[in-house]
Image (cartoon, coloured by chain):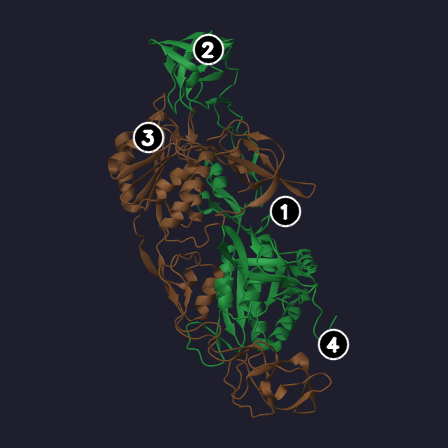
Chain colours: A brown, B green
Amino acid sequence: MKDLLGREDAVTVEKALSLLYEQKLQTPSTENTGIENAYGRVLSADVISPENLPGFNRSTMDGYAVNATDTFGASDSMPAYLTVTGEVHMGTKPDISLSRGGAAVIPTGGMLPVGADAVVMYEHTNRVGEDMLEVMKAVAPNENVILADEDVKEGDVILRAGQRLRPQDIGALAGLGILNIDVFKKPVVAIISTGDEVIPPDKPRAAGEVRDINSYNLAGLIIRGGGIPLKKGIISDDFDLLRATVRESMQEAQMVLISGGSSVGTRDYTSRVIDELGHPGILFHGVSIKPGKPLIGGMVNGIPLFGLPGHPAAVSVCFETFIEPLLKKISGEKRRKKLLPSGRTVRAFFGRNISSSTGREDHIRVALELRDNCLWARPILGKSGLIRTLVEADGTVIIPLNKNGITREKQLR
Amino acid sequence: MKDLLGREDAVTVEKALSLLYEQKLQTPSTENTGIENAYGRVLSADVISPENLPGFNRSTMDGYAVNATDTFGASDSMPAYLTVTGEVHMGTKPDISLSRGGAAVIPTGGMLPVGADAVVMYEHTNRVGEDMLEVMKAVAPNENVILADEDVKEGDVILRAGQRLRPQDIGALAGLGILNIDVFKKPVVAIISTGDEVIPPDKPRAAGEVRDINSYNLAGLIIRGGGIPLKKGIISDDFDLLRATVRESMQEAQMVLISGGSSVGTRDYTSRVIDELGHPGILFHGVSIKPGKPLIGGMVNGIPLFGLPGHPAAVSVCFETFIEPLLKKISGEKRRKKLLPSGRTVRAFFGRNISSSTGREDHIRVALELRDNCLWARPILGKSGLIRTLVEADGTVIIPLNKNGITREKQLR
């Protein structure tokens, strides 16, 4: 559908996302890596425990290993009396075994000797002389003990394919003696800057020119999202050159971002290139989002391609809303908890009424300020400067499609 | 102060943090780096703009550059009539200048020609024939224009020392033509594992032994916190060896973490070593936090040293609560917004009553679940296994010092 000025109708954010998500993507490749290099990587196969853990009956307290039966009925006024027959040392199999009525000193983490089935905490005992022990509290069998297979059983699935590995997950792998794992390769994302006015930041700038901000912003967003940026440089507004560069990028990358000149010509080139290169081509051409309305989304041979608007603030909004979720998907990540916000959110007061048109999703950049011990979100308004809005914003307030604006407290993304 | 069992009194979390924060730290070193490698790094000096931006009067709309005076009073019923005398091209200084009554086609981002002081949006014009333009809406001077120094002025502070650089900040630096910046060196954090029962994950495990989980968990937490982990290996419970290893680590690192065997002996060694190596030595020995109570905190010659409890869940809690904020500080980062949570928080329902002792801060590991379209936090309780609690937890619910527990909805860290 086109409007009166010959422009395509914009789709809603929800529709754009569903158009992207229903496409079949290329299957990500995998590689084997040592766990010390796997922080933040995405597992490509379930991890199965090769053994029981802790693998031995383990004390969870400093105290005495005992036979629980020997402590039944013990109390402050009527202690049980046991004989201390030895000591368990950390990291070794005890060289003693416990007979009825016996007790052995045991540290937290120590292995229970044969004949012991519980641990009395140090605090509930009283050593009388060399080897006599008063026990002031009864323990049940297995009390203060982790059984040999209680933490993990051999064959248990410990971590699942599609999980992004956190520090503690790598710790768990080390604990199981698993030193190498299969992970998805990080997706490469090509960045093509277009626009006759755009120059590289190391070139002297003449009147009318702007330096390439978007490649640098996008590269950082890609790294943060778990991908590898591949900068393809700045190309002028030339259809054949753009097509050749996009085609080359599709050989090298799993996603292609065309950071657009804002001119109508560039946008037309971008959408024609995406449509010419294969199926299904363009998925949408314009989204009901501000900033970011001119966004073009497409898919060719399972590779997502985006034509981004030229304004840096719009680039950030489009990346966070459309590209980052797709980047996670082509990284092989499965979002286990759909309701979790993808970014950090804080609650803040909004000091000002802001109106928004129904029918579009407004992303308002805000700076956070501390007033009277409360967080306030101050909108960064005014003309759309390139640099100020970037560095001053702490985050974004989203006004949904069907709202006319906000007046006060609002969740901040 | 010691209790009846000869153990040191625990301090509150707040007290422990203030004891750490009031110490003088070593000044972090700086280095110069290219902006393409500076994502996530911390600026060590303010960045001053070397020039005005955009550097020329720039259109923010597609339309016609005009002299605003020529449009005064224009409306749908009474358009102003102008003569189109040329076109502005992207990225070049216009080769035309505007006389009174003239207009020039201009794209978004184009440079205003001499004689023009405003831009009429395309939508508010009607081209009549070759060079006649009907203007249906008046514009004020500077309307739809960013003035040459309106975004950034030469000499403005753009980014401040102590800021951690986000993707958009690097974009802004590129936009200013700043390719190299001064940043603080990433702090190196030494990790020493102790305990006779601890073995490296690549060794076969005998009964009574556990593999080194904590070094791997800590290394990931350090990387995530912006530091460089330096693994010093596993050393047995030997005072002289521990002292030598800590001393060596203090030459190589800006912080030292001793991941403790849980045994009383190791803890005593750790605190004796910290006290022997210099001033002020031990700052606290035990904190009112669960898990993590046995934490030892110290400082020697401006280098923070921590003796961590052996249990992996306690290691994570101690890191997030005490070590991460200090790591940010020795990274040179200044927290501009003290009220911002350091981690991600979500709101979730809590399905179960949990009691907590007044006088200690409880950190309860929880898994998040989706029920009836709501997030629920399910506490991971039971015996303190090593692996399960690590991999199953999605986050932590904190019950403050002066609360007896929680019953329902609670913010999740």
The lab-note entry on whether marks 3 and 2 share a chain reads: no
Q: Which tag, 1 or 4, sits closer to the chain's start?
A: 4
Q: Indicate the secondary structure of the residue bearing disc 1.
A: loop
Q: Indicate the secondary structure of the residue bearing disc 2.
A: loop
Which residue appears at 38% of the width and 49% of the height?
A329
Q: Nearer the viewer, residue A47 or B35?
A: A47
What chain letter is assigned to the residue under label 4?
B
Tell us which disc is closer to us: 3 or 2.
2
Q: Which mark is residue B76?
A: 2
Q: Quadrant of residue A381?
A: top right
Alpha carbon of mark 1 to alpha carbon of mark 3: how far? 46 Å
The lab-note entry on whether marks 1 and 2 share a chain reads: yes
The residue pinned by badge 1 equals B339
Q: Are marks 3 and 2 in contact (CB under 8 Å)?
A: no
The lab-note entry on whether marks 1 and 3 share a chain reads: no
The residue pinned by badge 3 equals A236
Q: Is residue B172 above or below residue B257?
A: above
Q: Nearer the viewer, residue A254 or B18?
A: A254
What kind of residue is marked 3? Ser
